[in-house]
Image (cartoon, coloured by chain):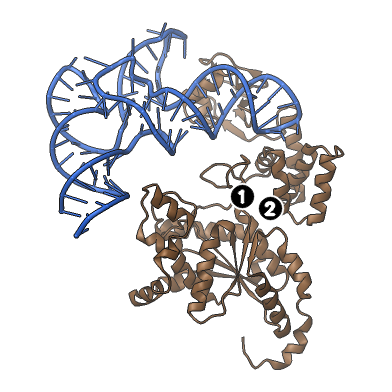
RNA sequence: GGACGGGUGGGUGAGUGGUUAAAACCAGCAGACUGUAAAUCUGCCGCUCCUUGCGGGCUACGAAGGUUCGAAUCCUUCCCCGUCCA
């Protein structure tokens, strides 16, 4: 970052693609760019000076696993990386302990340091499935936030007003509904603004629900004498239910570390209409390609299921490779469309022993959470042994001699049992 | 600090002494249907035991005590949340 690198200017003139081209690439799928002309100007300037833009994405490690919803914005960061800009992945190890109030209708218990550290660790590995490990600048916001003095915090707070803070939807609605708002929650956008100040970011990415926070960051940067970052928001990925946003707590998510066959099943279960937004936000297909596909389906030339299968395969390829994705497709075809037993079901080996109640066995094999639930499943004809439904909920399973059978509980759960 | 209102199952929310493991709705699960879904229909939806029965036991309505043959429901104390006043 030396400033006297004058000769370099001409050398790097072609390091970056033309601004128009970059803009087109970066704009795919975005919800909003605020303010858009400023982004063009920053790109222009970077091309002239050969200085890459600093683009950052902050994520609070609040859960141990990332899901497809997180990847929407990560993919966008990757796009900037592809164009030669600096991708900064910020782990909000400090801010996670405050808890982002965005979209939350009640105060959540803050995470402990231990939880945050453990989550941060698993996050990074997962993030590198998308970002280029070599080119990513990873930072932790505890680096500067844990050092803030009370004086600095007071100064920071003086830069923003309560009225403006209360503009945000989640605060207002909580206020209206007599729900508590803790004071530390007001601090969240201000403290994360310190990240933006420290990183001297040119662009910050986030989901649309982050708009408020990102705008505060921009405002605070300017209060601290910086140019003010451009904000680029991505749409929220709708979850598998087709209704609410994808989130772990709602259970309507696809985790990026899940097995290919599970991802496949989940992706196939989305409502047909939803697949277009998935195509847009989770694949590298161009808008033109997507519209073309859409036309083929609505014109009856392509079966919606077929289009969805392609989608599932493409998404899975990103995380597990083409080969695994293809296998997942075959597995799905076999198990769900032809209702056959899977080729490879997880196998559990048991040692010979006295006979066991089927209900107990189901619980032991984690095919049912409790014996009551197991009994229910049997009564509902959801349990099969080697393809034959069991109707007797008191059935004993003979484990005294070596056998081998396939146990099924419900549509999706299979386990092959080997007794030796 | 004071006055008032409130804390019920994964969620919303009814229930003010007993057929209440707790209405209703949502979510979830299973079966049927189907192209995977969605929609729809049917059933289930605390745990556990067995003799599988409108069966027995246990746990549960913020926490702890108490009254009572019996409490989510009454009393006491405590904790937590909100509103208004200061």
Residues at marks 1 and 2 touching, judged by CB atoms closer than 8 Å: yes
| Category of crowding for the residue at label 1, using alpha-carbon neighbours closer than 10 angstroms: few (below 14), some (14–19), many (at least 20) | some
Above or below, comparing residue A418 to residue A48 in the picture: above
Query: Closer to the camera, A351 or A331?
Result: A331
Chain painted blue: B
Query: Closer to the camera, B50 or B37?
Result: B37
Q: Quadrant of residue A52?
A: bottom right
Q: Estimate the x, y position of residue A373 in percent, counting from the top left.
A: 49, 25
Q: Residue at x 75, y 32 (%)?
A: A334
Above or below, comparing residue A368 to residue A250 in the picture: above
Q: Earlier in the sequence, mark 1 or mark 2?
A: 1
Q: Chain letter for mark 1, please.
A: A
Q: From this viewpoint, which residue is outermost toward the right?
A: A301
Q: Estimate the x, y position of residue A180 in percent, counting from the top left.
A: 36, 51
Residue A357 seen in this snapshot: no
Above or below, comparing residue A350 to residue A285 in the picture: above
Reading the image, the residue beneath label 2 is: A319
Above or below, comparing residue A340 to residue A107 in the picture: above
A188 relative position to B26: left or right: left
Looking at the rendered structure, the secondary structure element under dot 1 is loop
Q: Chain letter for mark 2, please.
A: A
B16 relative position to A26: left or right: left
Q: Residue at x 55, y 30 (%)?
A: A367
Reading the image, the residue beneath label 1 is: A257
Q: Residue at x 53, y 26 (%)?
A: A362
Q: Quadrant of residue A414?
A: top right
Same chain under badges 1 and 2? The reply is yes
Q: Estimate the x, y position of residue A18 in percent, counting from the top left.
A: 78, 75
Mark on residue A238?
Answer: none
Chain painted brown: A
Position of the C terminus of chain A, as image quadrant, is top right
Label 1 to label 2: alpha-carbon separation: 8 Å
């Amino acid at each position: 970052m030396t400033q006297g690198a004058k000769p370099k200017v001409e050398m790097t003139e072609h390091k970056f693609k033309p601004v128009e081209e970059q803009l087109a690439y970066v704009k795919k799928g975005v919800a909003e760019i605020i303010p858009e002309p400023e982004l063009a100007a920053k790109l222009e300037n970077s091309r002239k000076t050969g200085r890459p833009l600093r683009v950052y994405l902050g994520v609070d490690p609040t859960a141990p696993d990332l899901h497809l919803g997180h990847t929407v914005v990560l993919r966008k960061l990757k796009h900037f990386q592809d164009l030669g800009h600096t991708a900064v992945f910020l782990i909000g190890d400090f801010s996670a302990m405050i808890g982002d109030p965005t979209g939350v209708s009640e105060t959540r218990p803050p995470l402990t340091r231990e939880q945050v550290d453990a989550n941060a660790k698993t996050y990074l590995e997962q993030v590198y499935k998308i970002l280029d490990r070599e080119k990513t600048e990873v930072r932790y916001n505890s680096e500067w936030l844990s050092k803030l003095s009370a004086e600095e915090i007071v100064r920071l707070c003086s830069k923003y007003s309560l009225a403006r803070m209360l503009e945000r939807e989640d605060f207002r609605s909580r206020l209206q509904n007599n729900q508590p708002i803790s004071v530390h929650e007001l601090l969240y956008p201000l403290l994360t603004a310190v990240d933006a100040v420290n990183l001297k970011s040119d662009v910050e990415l986030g989901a649309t629900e982050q708009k408020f926070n990102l705008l505060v960051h921009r405002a605070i940067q300017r209060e601290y004498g910086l140019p003010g970052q451009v904000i680029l928001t991505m749409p929220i990925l709708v979850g598998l239910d087709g209704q609410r946003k994808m989130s772990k707590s709602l259970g309507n998510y696809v985790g990026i570390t899940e097995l290919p066959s599970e991802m496949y099943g989940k992706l196939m279960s989305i409502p047909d209409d939803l697949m277009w937004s998935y195509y847009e936000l989770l694949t590298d297909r161009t808008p033109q390609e997507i519209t073309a596909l859409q036309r083929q389906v609505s014109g009856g030339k392509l079966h919606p299921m077929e289009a969805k299968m392609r989608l599932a395969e493409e998404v899975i390829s990103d995380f597990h490779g083409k080969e695994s994705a293809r296998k997942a497709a075959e597995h799905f075809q076999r198990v769900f469309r032809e209702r056959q037993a899977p080729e490879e079901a997880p196998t559990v080996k048991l040692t010979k022993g006295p006979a066991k109640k089927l209900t107990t066995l189901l619980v032991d094999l984690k095919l049912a959470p409790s014996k009551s639930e197991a009994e229910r499943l049997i009564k509902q004809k959801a349990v099969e042994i080697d393809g034959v439904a069991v109707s007797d909920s008191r059935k004993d399973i003979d484990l005294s001699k070596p056998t081998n059978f396939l146990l099924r509980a419900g549509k999706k759960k299979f386990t092959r049992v080997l007794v030796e």
